[in-house]
Image: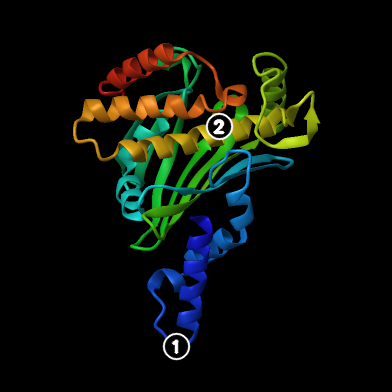
Amino acid sequence: MLKTNVTWLRAAALLCAAGCSLPTWAIDAAAQELLTKYGSMEGRLRVNQFNQPLVLDSLEASNRVTGEIHAVISHPFVTVRTNLNDAGHWCDVISLHINTKYCRAVVAPNGTILKVNIGNKTPQDLKDASRLEFKYKVLHATERYLDIKLSAQDGPMGSSDYRIELEAIPLPNAQTFLHFTYSYAMSFPARLAMQTYLATIGNGKLGFTETGPPGNGQPQYIGGVRALIERNTMRYYLAIDSFLASASEANPSTRLEKRLQSWFSAVEQYPLQLHEVDRAAYLSMKHDEYVRQQTAD
């Protein structure tokens, strides 16, 4: 399927080079860049550790850590654009993450804000969770290209400059090519706090990047800060996919249950990296948080 998509796109480009009128998405620089990226990643999308068209990368710089996913998802672009071009729906996505305790989209004088509380992987009072306020911006939402950015100035443990970005373009066969990025900056105090976390609660937790040949028949995976950003990037990506899979459900209760079940099943495909609690505990906590979200400010 992936090879067919790339061939189709290359053929379209050749035809247009011969004299046809290029569609808007093809002449838009950002969309064209994403399309080029799709073609260049053909091999990695076809053959990877996830056994699906998904590539996860991470980068740790001196003051910033970034996780990035490129993936082909089995949702039509119109479904992606319609459902993610909505701040409230992003709260539905973000709330699936096990560390999210609360999310509400509000219209402020300077634009739409997502008020998000991040905390433990177990039930927690909102007063004990960290509050982030994400500015929500739809940069492009055309028939051929979607670009949405969320940014927050301050985060927990001295972290700052949080950035979430999603880009998408349509593919043939009712598929979409998705580019998702999650990153934040870390000051020196933030790095010290992170080192303490990684030496205690986060000790031994792994990411997805393979760091060397298998030992005892098992792959060796990256640890530390890159492992942390990779785990959370994957959690958010799986939340997007689970939200989209439930979008067609008309009944709100059924829609909520479907996306919760879908997200938990998805993360449990990677127990070494993502398992935290059992299904019953996750569902109970998220249902309680959903009820609280309807009334808390």
272 lies left or right of 266: right
Q: Residues within 10 Å of mark 2 (few under 14, many from 20)?
A: many
At label 2, the amino acid type is: Asn
Q: Which residue is mark 2?
A: 232
Instruction: Residue 271: name its quadrant.
Output: top right
278 lies left or right of 198: left
C-alpha span from label 2 to label 1: 45 Å
Q: Which residue is mark 1?
A: 19
Instruction: Residue 36: name its quadrant.
Output: bottom right
Going from N to C along the chain, the mark reached first, 2 or 1, is 1
Spot occupied by residue 272 in the image (x, y as percentages of width and height): 62, 23
- For the point 47% across and 19% down, which residue is it? 129
- Residue 52 vs residue 113, the one in the foreground: 52
- Residue 153 vs residue 93, the one in the foreground: 93
User: Circle 2 sits in a helix, a strand or a loop, which is it?
Assistant: helix
Q: Residues within 10 Å of mark 1 (few under 14, many from 20)?
A: few
Residue 259 in view, yes or no: yes
- Residue 291 vs residue 159, the one in the foreground: 291
Residue 117 in view, yes or no: no
Instruction: Residue 78: name its quadrant.
Output: bottom left
Q: Residue furthest bottom?
A: 19
Spot occupied by residue 1 in the image (x, y as percentages of width and height): 48, 55
